[in-house]
Image (spheres, grey):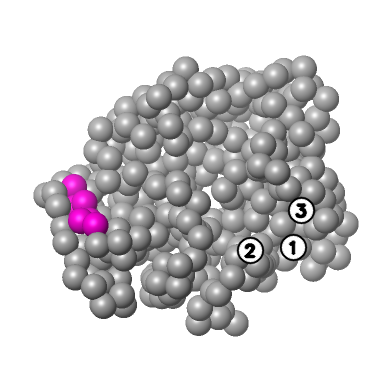
Amino acid sequence: MLPAVVTSEEQLEELLSRPSAADIAFARTLTDDVVVLGAGGKMGPSLARRVRRACDAAANPRRVLAVARFSEPGTAAALERDRIEPITCDLLDPAQVSRLPRAPNVLFLAGRKFGSTGRPDLTWAQNVIVPSIVASHFEGSRIVVFSSGNVYAPVPPSSTGSTETDPVDPVGEYAQTCVGRERVFEHASRERGTPCVFFRLFYAVDLRYGTLVDVARKVHAGERVDLRVGHVNALWQGDANSYAFRGLSLCESPPRPLVATGPEVVSVREAAKAFGRRFGRPVRFIGTPGPALLGDPASCVSLLGDPEVGLVQLVDWVADWVARGGRSLDRPTHFEATDGRF
């Protein structure tokens, strides 16, 4: 049962990491350990916990290892309390990576987006050089490679979104590095047989960040909502965690691309109006709607099922969270950017 509202970060973290029946069923099939690379970011801790809880519920005692620099104090200790093994490692250092256990199941979350414009060299290093180091060390492992909808070109507002068969056509340097990440893993897959999935995620929403949160916070603050990108995707992060974990079952060589997002295309204008009604505040807009980055999740849904949290529930949770002053991670998605600069 899903709660009507989410009232605390403790409850939020529990929901994000709560395994679904499908997660538990998949965990029963695991014959070896799971490593989460880049486990210190927005999604890493809750994804690692979901894997741990799914294995526990399946009575399958696999190790779950969480690898990151762990620059945020307390993250590693908190994971360890939940019986996840934290390993501090700079993935840009081949010597450190060479000492990592070679787990057969890899969830690769490492990457850089926010602040990409200020340090493009670092973005290229994190998004292209790190994959080269990781792909070499984890040769032969199943790897779910977190990618982005930014690998695609914008589509008309009336479109249902890009699909796995559409060509990549990145706009801006950040998006180019996302294609670079995929190409490096594709090379490893084709040359060494490493099975992969390119997990092209379109905007996971945790109540502390995400496309819907960006819109809600602007409405709540009385700021104008930018309509240059008039339609967006949104997927509850818990469902993104579930899809990524079970995406291990879809890894193949050459890699399989997978568009992961919610089934509904969200109108920014209508979402803003809905938040305005909830907050009792007027809504102001700026900009003229044009093409948008959108993904069609039909293939993902057919392979992994519908998300557990629908759009109506997600909007309700976001509205309540923002209205009650819930914490923000202050990491805007910049979904309204049309030039690829983040």
In 3D space, how far apart are the residues under numbered discs 2 and 1 (Cα atoms)?
15 Å
Residue 167, position in %: x, y? Answer: 34, 34
Q: Residue at x 61, y 24 (%)?
A: 130
Numbered disc 2: secondary structure: helix
Decide which of tag 2 and tag 1 comes sooner along the chain. 2
N-term mark: 2 or 3: 2
Q: Residues within 10 Å of mark 3 (few under 14, many from 20)?
A: few
Q: Position of residue 112 (x, y in %)?
A: 51, 33
Q: CA distance from mark 3 to mark 1?
A: 18 Å
**Left or right for 332, reference 23:** left
Q: Residue at x 82, y 64 (%)?
A: 56
Disc 3 residue type (three-letter): Ala
Kind of element beneath mark 1: helix
Task: Tell me residue 65's x, y (percent).
Answer: 78, 44
Label 2, label 3: how far apart the Cα atoms are? 12 Å
Q: In the rendered structure, which segment of residues is drawn in magenta?
A: 223-228
Q: Residue at x 16, y 58 (%)?
A: 285
Q: Which residue is mark 1?
A: 54
Q: Nearer the viewer, residue 319 or 108?
A: 319
Q: What label does residue 13 carry, if any? A: 2
